[in-house]
Amino acid sequence: MTSRRLIRIKVLQLLYAFSKKENVTLAEIERDLLKSMSKSTDLYYETFSLLTEIRHKAFLKIDAARNRHLVSNIELNPNTRFIENPIFDLIEKNKKFQTYINSNAISWADNQEMIVYFYNKLLEWPAYQKYMYRKEITFEQHKQLVLDFFSEVIIQDDMFYQTLEEKNIFWNDDFELVLSIVHKTLWHIKEHTKEDDDIFYPIYKPQEDAEFARTLMRKAYMGYEENIKLIDKFTYNWELDRISDMDKLIMACAIAELKHFPSIPIKVTLDEYIEISKTYSSSKSSAFINGVLDKAVSLLKDTNEVIKTGRGLME
């Protein structure tokens, strides 16, 4: 999933939700759109925070064992390879990470059962046992352990998604994009990274994606009735009120994008909304939407309401 597709989904969902309410203003919808986008970034940092909290749990276990009244030799001289894994320090001590989690109240303090759950899964994980008892370890092997723990254990577990969805309702559609960027971030960490190096990626391009989101929301909201009239011309075998509200909204948003974003190719817009319909509409909706939009594009071209600029966009 791309960040633009996630923005399109957020626009559709908010327009759908607000269509069921009375006396809603465009300003309110825009406010919630930008809030929803900011929550994607929260999810990104929440996931990194989870990793560092699991390391912290491992440290606390070792520390508690060392301070017991009767201490075994193993407890007195524990294997500290995991808690000394340099990837955790490069995340946790990073200035951007610290600034974000402190400014946005990112914390697992109220979800300690999640930390314990994944710490116990870590101990049972065969790759962890191999990692802990290798004779020598390189930076890349340290990094691979964290990457594999994230991709093979954490994000394969329903507990992870259930807990995060309970923390924030905005995250349900964000997982695919955000978790792929978490993996990308971990993959690109280098051995000589410093605490003030910017190792974290933006979920959205700060100005460009925000402008795309606001413009799409405004044009889809303000042009909805006009775009629905256009859709009605090509649904002559259907009464308009028999088409689901989400299908109408998907087509109306697609038409708004076709009209008002001259730099986005027609094929990109059509493909994106048809893909979205496969998840957010009925099983037969994508073929229906595709057929209607194809006819709408032909008419909009004839009336010069769709004009694309730039090389490769004049189809």
Image (cartoon, rainbow, N blue to C red):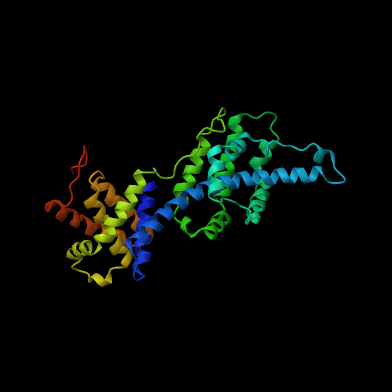
Of all residues, the one furthest to the right in this rendering is: 70
Against 57, is 31 above or below?
below
Above or below: residue 221 compared with residue 106: below
Q: Position of residue 190 (x, y in %)?
A: 54, 30
For the point 21% across and 42% down, which residue is it? 313
Q: Is residue 267 visible?
A: yes
Position of residue 77 in the picture relative to residue 41 (left or right): right
Of residues 297 and 25, the one drawn nearer to the viewer in this rendering:
25
Is residue 53 left or right of 1 when viewed as pictured?
right
**Front one among 24 and 180:** 24
Q: Is residue 151 above or below residue 231?
A: above
Image quarter for residue 93?
top right
Q: Which corner quadrant of the image does residue 59 belong to?
A: top right
Asked whether residue 287 is in view, the answer is: no
Determine the residue positioned at 79% across, 36% down.
77
Q: Is residue 288 above or below residue 64?
A: below
**Image quadrant for the C terminus?**
top left
Residue 284 location in percent, x, y?
Answer: 32, 63
Task: Kindly identify the residue that appears in the image at 77 percent across and 38 percent down.
Answer: 78
| 117 and 29: which is toward the camera | 29
Residue appearing at x 15%, y 51% in the figure = 301
The x and y percentages for residue 57 are 69, 47
User: Where's residue 270, x and y in %?
Assistant: 27, 52
